[in-house]
Amino acid sequence: MDFKQRLYDLASIVDVALNKLLPPEDTYPQTIYKAMRYSIFGGGKRLRPILMVSTYEALNGNKEDVIPYACAIEMIHTYSLIHDDLPAMDNDDYRRGKLTNHKVFGDAMAILAGDALLNIATETMIKTALNNPNKHIKYLHAMNEIMTASGTFGMLSGQVVDIESERVQIDENTLNFMHSHKTGALITASVRAGAILGGTSKSQLEALTEFSKNLGLAFQIKDDILDIEGDESKLGKKVGSDQKNNKSTFPSVYGLDRSKEMVIQISQKAIDALEIFNNEGEFLRQLTYYLIKRES
Amino acid sequence: MDFKQRLYDLASIVDVALNKLLPPEDTYPQTIYKAMRYSIFGGGKRLRPILMVSTYEALNGNKEDVIPYACAIEMIHTYSLIHDDLPAMDNDDYRRGKLTNHKVFGDAMAILAGDALLNIATETMIKTALNNPNKHIKYLHAMNEIMTASGTFGMLSGQVVDIESERVQIDENTLNFMHSHKTGALITASVRAGAILGGTSKSQLEALTEFSKNLGLAFQIKDDILDIEGDESKLGKKVGSDQKNNKSTFPSVYGLDRSKEMVIQISQKAIDALEIFNNEGEFLRQLTYYLIKRES
């Protein structure tokens, strides 16, 4: 199947499922559901759910229900963006060409909408596990991957280091810690949870973990580069925000040219890690190329 | 055993367990762990964990590991207080006689510390379930109780209505919705999760649910009364904050005298619900009297 078509199809499947999993906007009290839906349907690429589902498919997962878990990781990702954008954090007014959550709903509701998305992600995973007798262990392991990655041993400590590194020149180790946690952990969890639900072998899980770590790193470096030389109309936000917020980035630590080389080298390591997969790994390979060539 | 001694012992057991479950303060990046621990060890009464453990004990739970779940609900309760106190929400400077989290660590870190406590609560529950083969279903059901109660069908929607009701005179139905969700849901979940882990029958669960709903309501009305006529030195915070924030409370809707009558009537309904329990329900009865007579 055509790669772009498959990418579009997977995003659509995730969108439909998210729409079913989130209570409708007329549920009382309406504001919180409006705020949650505003950001969930705010134009995200659905990278993490697509990674989870396509990893699952690469392992011929036998039609277990991976979609709710894919939606859960998108809810977690979205909550982290809402809280990230708050005035107390990065103070961003726009994301993906739309006003950020707190600019529309106010700071209090944005905090609660973020909390609510993290919470409903866990509710979704727990209820899915309860509804699938005999698969509890798999689901608990997938939940464990996801919740560990979103906590202080993953995403949250990356966010802490990010905040504490503003206006400070950080070294390479700190930069690597920050990004491997802030962005990398959830990308790795997407792949690993998809693998666990798909019925992975130990060697497959090791290969996929190596793939995901390199993919996450290449993705983040590309993100930093786009913040310097991206097209604002395509990105849907102003470029230069890292510099404005005095953020340490790969270009600020390694230089722009070296950063571009790193994207190519590291994404190649991601592709190499997939060598134990034949044709079934093709979508993940194409996804890697797609992500490092993206313009938004 | 002496009631007060048992209360103290249970709180101590929870404190010791929380100290083990939360990463030490010297874990990198230190600030987040300091902020989490600051509020977790900020003088909380441990009401919810004590309710969970004592419900579990009333059912002669056969030494299953209820303590991590009791700690998880305290982590969730604490996260909700940290976010509640933020300038964007209630803007409180003091809680239990100490500066609120954001006054010590800043707004950004307080938001992240709250997020982290919600997250680690789920990690704790998931890992406990994974470490106890053959008890997965019980643990998943207890998790489901707790996470549903902390989400938008529980605590969070109470918080939303609370915020939206400031400077507005609300009716009795809205007040009841607000409190049964904001405070009641997590208290009910403490009891129900303890019952599920303790191996409850259907009729016991119904009785305990009725008990917990009335206990939660009486507890909240008492809280509202203490905010009017409590002793600031015992409460560790200023009284009159509800009035200052134009909050609708039971006294503001029903009047102070009627509110006091309600505490007595509703707590009696809680006690009555325990009639199917003999001596094993004694601690829960004494806890009910203790909570409605408390001065802080």
Image (tube, coloured by chain):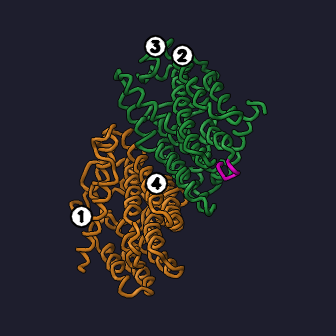
Chain colours: A green, B orange
Residue nearest the observer in this picture, A201 or B174 = A201
What is the secondary structure assignment of the residue under circle 1? Answer: loop
Magenta part, dominant SS = loop
Dots 4 and 2 on the same chain: no
Q: Quadrant of residue A126?
A: bottom right
Q: Which residue is the site of mark 3?
A: A255
Residue nearest the observer in this picture, B51 or A10 = A10
Q: Chain of mark 1?
A: B
Please say if the residues under marks 3 and 1 sit with CB atoms less than 8 Å apart: no
| Residue sitting at x 53%, y 23% | A266
Q: Is residue A82 magenta?
A: no
Residue nearest the observer in this picture, A76 or B157 = A76
What is the secondary structure assignment of the residue under circle 4? Answer: helix
Q: What quarter of the picture does the C terminus of chain A occupy?
A: top right
Mark 3 residue type: Gly
View extreme (top): residue:
A257
Q: Which residue is the site of mark 2?
A: A260
The mark lying in front, picked from 1 and 2, is 2
Q: Earlier in the sequence, mark 2 or mark 3?
A: 3
| Mark seen at residue B122 | 4
Q: Which residue is the site of mark 1?
A: B231
Disc 2 and disc 3: Cα gap in Å?
9 Å
Disc 4 and disc 2: Cα gap in Å?
38 Å
